[in-house]
């Protein structure tokens, strides 16, 4: 029961942290609950389909189907997170200034929550399918009986969700005027970490050169198998022994999304926000 | 054209590492043990690992030092490429049964 709980917790943790960050990043947007929980629900349903087809996926494309699938999911999530951040730098300030004037969050209904809903769905799909495969394996082996498995699974699920709730509550305790800056940095690092993970899958499938199998080793400081190591791995892409190609993908993602945010958002933000607002009210 | 020698060097270096790959190395999962648990592999070249799961439970072949993770279905076999590695010991484990561990020893 306990080993089951621990493994389910570890798999759920990653998805729960991502959901926590997304919920914090979309704070105050009407209808976000529907989008986010829609994402979770589609993720759960998708996880079952993926788990059922795991053998087919793994065997596809000369045995590297699983890597291609994981990498595709991760890069799709990176694109969605990047797009959300770029959109937010363009419109976030207009919204903030409009909200300040009117005292309410107006015009936020147009905010593209589908991008974040897709991120949530993909995270739940990826981690959830591993949970399903793992539990299915235990069920087949008949170890400990179905009751122990169910109890362990539920404990693991609740512990994972509690971790997601903790990060959400931690983030929303940040004053609203700073929250946008904090969550856009978090989303940027989350995206970079996912790109680095995606690169690791393509490396595993021998589709990318490693450019140095282990650039450095900080596992003596913080092991990736420890709880904090896992949390930081998910949130900012912490990797104790990264391959060169992972660093390339990490930095390239930071650079591309960061530059696009700069370009699209502009640095003369307040003036721009004002003019945008007056244009709109005209 | 000035960059040609460097590009050619990169292409050659990469294909040399790919070509140097020898026969695949097989690791079997049985009774929650990796057989062998110490896997000798050549350092400095790419190696193809075949992981076969002879148990009736799903396993996940994982290594944090090699950043590899791949589900191995019960009764299934997977392929994982590693390296070129510098000489040393690299731990791997079954993420679904954390106590099931082994090492790649690159020489």
Image: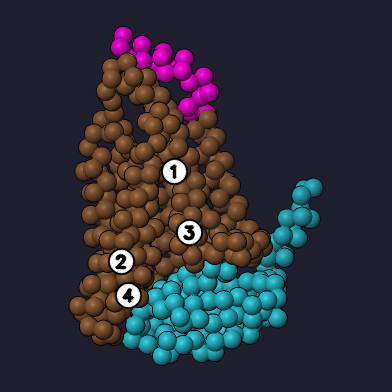
Chain colours: A brown, B cyan
Q: Quadrant of the C terminus of chain B?
A: bottom right
Judging depth in this view, the residue of A55 and A262 nearest the camera is A262
Kindly indicate whether the residues beneath marks 2 and 1 are on one polypeptide chain: yes
Residue B54 picture location, percent across and down:
40, 89
**The stretch drawn in magenta includes residue B28:** no
Q: Nearer the viewer, mark 3 or mark 1?
A: 3
Relative to B70, residue A256 above or below: above
Give the magenta part as a residue range: A263-282
The first of marks 3 and 4 along the sequence is: 4
Name the chain under label 1. Answer: A
Residue hosting label 1: A187
The first of marks 1 and 4 along the sequence is: 4
Can residue B39 be seen at all in this image of the molecule? Answer: yes
User: Disc number at residue A228?
Assistant: 3
Q: CA distance from mark 1 to mark 4?
A: 33 Å
Kindly indicate whether the residues beneath marks 1 and 4 are on one polypeptide chain: yes
């Amino acid at each position: 029961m306990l080993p089951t709980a621990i493994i389910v917790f570890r798999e759920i943790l990653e998805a729960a942290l991502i959901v926590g960050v997304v919920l914090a990043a979309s704070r105050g947007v009407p209808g976000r609950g529907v989008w986010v929980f829609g994402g979770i629900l589609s993720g759960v349903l998708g996880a079952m389909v993926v788990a059922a087809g795991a053998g087919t996926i793994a065997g596809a494309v000369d045995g590297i189907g699983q890597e291609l699938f994981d990498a595709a999911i991760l890069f799709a999530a990176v694109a969605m997170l990047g797009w959300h951040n770029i959109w937010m730098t363009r419109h976030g300030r207009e919204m903030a200034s409009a909200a300040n004037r009117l005292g309410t969050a107006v015009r936020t209904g147009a905010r593209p929550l589908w991008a974040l809903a897709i991120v949530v769905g993909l995270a739940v799909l990826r981690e959830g399918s591993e949970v399903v495969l793992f539990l299915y394996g235990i069920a087949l082996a008949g170890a400990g009986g179905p009751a122990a498995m169910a109890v362990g699974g539920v404990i693991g699920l609740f512990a994972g969700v509690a971790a997601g709730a903790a990060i959400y509550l931690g983030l929303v305790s940040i004053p609203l005027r700073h929250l946008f800056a904090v969550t856009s940095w978090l989303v940027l690092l989350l995206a970079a970490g996912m790109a680095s993970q995606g690169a690791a899958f393509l490396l595993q499938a021998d589709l990318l050169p490693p450019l140095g199998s282990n650039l450095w080793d900080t596992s003596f400081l913080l092991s990736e198998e420890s709880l904090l190591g896992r949390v930081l791995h998910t949130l900012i892409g912490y990797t104790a022994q990264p391959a060169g190609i992972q660093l390339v993908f990490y930095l390239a993602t930071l650079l591309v999304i960061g530059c696009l945010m700069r370009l699209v958002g502009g640095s003369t933000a307040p003036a721009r926000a004002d003019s945008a607002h007056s244009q709109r009210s005209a | 054209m000035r960059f040609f020698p460097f590009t050619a060097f990169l292409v050659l270096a990469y294909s040399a590492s790919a070509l140097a790959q020898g026969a695949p190395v097989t690791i079997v999962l049985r009774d929650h043990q990796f057989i062998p648990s110490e896997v000798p592999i050549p350092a400095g070249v790419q190696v193809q690992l075949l992981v076969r799961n002879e148990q009736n439970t799903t396993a996940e072949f994982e290594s944090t030092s090699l950043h590899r993770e791949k589900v191995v279905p019960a009764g299934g076999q997977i392929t994982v490429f590693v390296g070129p590695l510098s000489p040393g010991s690299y731990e791997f484990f079954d993420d679904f049964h954390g106590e099931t561990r082994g090492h790649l020893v690159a020489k």
